[in-house]
Image (cartoon, grey):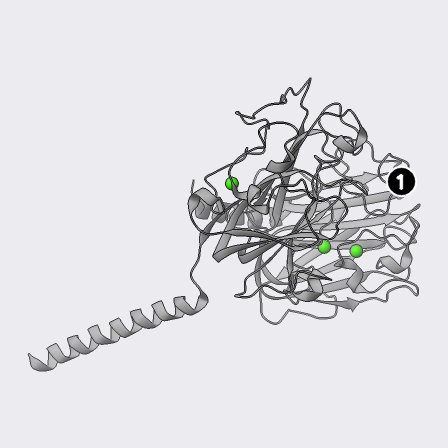
Amino acid sequence: MTKRSGRFLGLVAAVAALGGFLPGEVATGAIIYSVETRLHSESGINVSQPIAPFSTVPNLSAVDYASPARRNNVQLQIAAGTPQAGSGGVGKLVDGLWPWDGDRDAPSQVLFSDSGDLAVQFDLRQLVDIWRINTYSRHVSNRTPQVYTVYGSSAAVPPTTNGDPTGWTLIASVDTRNNSPGPPYGTTGTSLDGIAGASIYDDAGGPLGQYQHLLFVLQRPGTYGTFYGEIDIVTGSHPIITMESRYHGDPDNVGSGPITTNPFQWVPTVSNKDYADASQGHGVTATIVAGAKSSGSGAPSVLLDGQWPSTWDSPGQVLFDDGNYPFRVLFDLKDRLSVEMINTFSRHTQATNPSNGARTPQVYTLYGIDADTPPSATGDLIANGWIPIAVVDTRPYAYSNGTGTNLPGVAGVSITPLDGISLGVYRYLLFDFQPSTETYGTFYAEIDIFGTVVPEPASWLLVLFGLTSLGLVALRKRICGLTKS
Ligand SMILES: [Ca+2]
Ligand SMILES: [Ca+2]
Ligand SMILES: [Ca+2]
């Protein structure tokens, strides 16, 4: 089945689903949602920014379509209801942060109302294929459950601006109180303290629909308003980040010498066939633009040589930095690339002391820009104009017997788009590497960048102009021919 027909069937299914599906019901080709609630008392949850709190709901994102850092100019407004005194503003729904002000009860970091329903409207500024809508809440006791309905409009001007759903298209109704698909979800009813996530999607795999406006009618589950911390609007270019770690010894048995077969189960191994690889001759360069590599480290070109380091401790064959943070590496792709996949690899020796284990985990944020000249790579990258693509942290994805930051071995990360087509068009990519502990830098072995060159917008215009000119010439010839005959 082609992508196009799959998408069409998905839309048909979505339309059919609007007729009478029960919220949360699992059915083929329907718009459904998954929900998870986790207690603050569980391990790993009672922290400021839970890294991977859910198994079926993605963690909240700072790189979704609605994030201001993506520069899509999405506008939010309260359409109906009144936020509670002490509540944060609508901007808290798109700041990419879990609510936290040093406490699990952070009213200024969320949007809520105790006096009635709240209607929040998003103007996406253009028609957008929406693949997922994810919502997040957090409270210390009884303000965690989410009960809401979300509607969409594909019109340039929305049907209403006062929270009335008349004329809007129903997308889904969510109630996290009764749709927790597995343990642990705390107590029943409205006493679900902790954090909750809901993810709305079309289980046929395509977009939920194409909309310019979204209307969320947020209901109070009981006496108290829910503490909404984030709403993510996810499009097809959104990154899916697959992370894996393997150990040099049992049970993973990667070994201490050359790596000749793929050590991973889901991530591809190091490639010399990617667009950026030196062997491909595209002239892609990697340059340290902030910080400095350690004296024993190899040059940034080791990231483009298509090779794993030959042993488990080959500092000259990897790029690393101990303590010169920020440590940032700029890739000049020398062309506008529709980026289809980015894979990053690291390797370090056995765990004879904790520092060794700290050099395999990968912690970085990846940025990009589609411009002839890159913005400044020092200071605040988002303020400079860089667009965040992905936030990576492999530490929670340990191999079977790894713990904490002591994870020696190999780590692989694969960043692919949700729609399987493109992460976006970029001329430059910027890796902002962070240490996995305070002191020791990761041994980066390779960065593979797969993609397809796309023409400058200006050359498209030239091509179109050229075709138009040819068309005019042909037309004139025909007219001339007609007048002559
Ligand atoms: Ca977000
Ligand atoms: Ca937030
Ligand atoms: Ca490569």
Q: Residue furthest top?
A: 250
Q: Quadrant of residue 209?
A: bottom right
Q: Position of residue 375 (x, y in %)?
A: 62, 65
Query: Splitting the image into four quadrants, where does ligand 1 fall?
Result: bottom right
Q: Number of marks in the image?
A: 1
Label 1 beta carbon less than 8 Å to ligand 2 = no
Q: Quadrant of residue 368?
A: bottom right
Residue 367 visible? The answer is yes
What residue is drawn where x is 87% and y is 38%?
Answer: 39
453 in relation to 240, above or below: below
Quarter of the picture containing the N terminus is top left
- Badge 1 marks a residue whose secondary structure is loop
The residue under label 1 is: 40
Left or right of 139 on screen, residue 152: left
Residue nearer the viewer, 358 or 213: 358
Residue 74 visible? The answer is no
Q: Position of residue 178 (x, y in %)?
A: 79, 39
Q: Residue furthest left?
A: 485
Quarter of the picture containing the C terminus is bottom left
Q: Amino acid at mark 1?
A: His
What residue is drawn where x is 64% and y is 59%?
Answer: 387
Q: Residue furthest bottom?
A: 483
Q: Position of residue 116 (x, y in %)?
A: 87, 61
Residue nearer the viewer, 331 or 450: 331
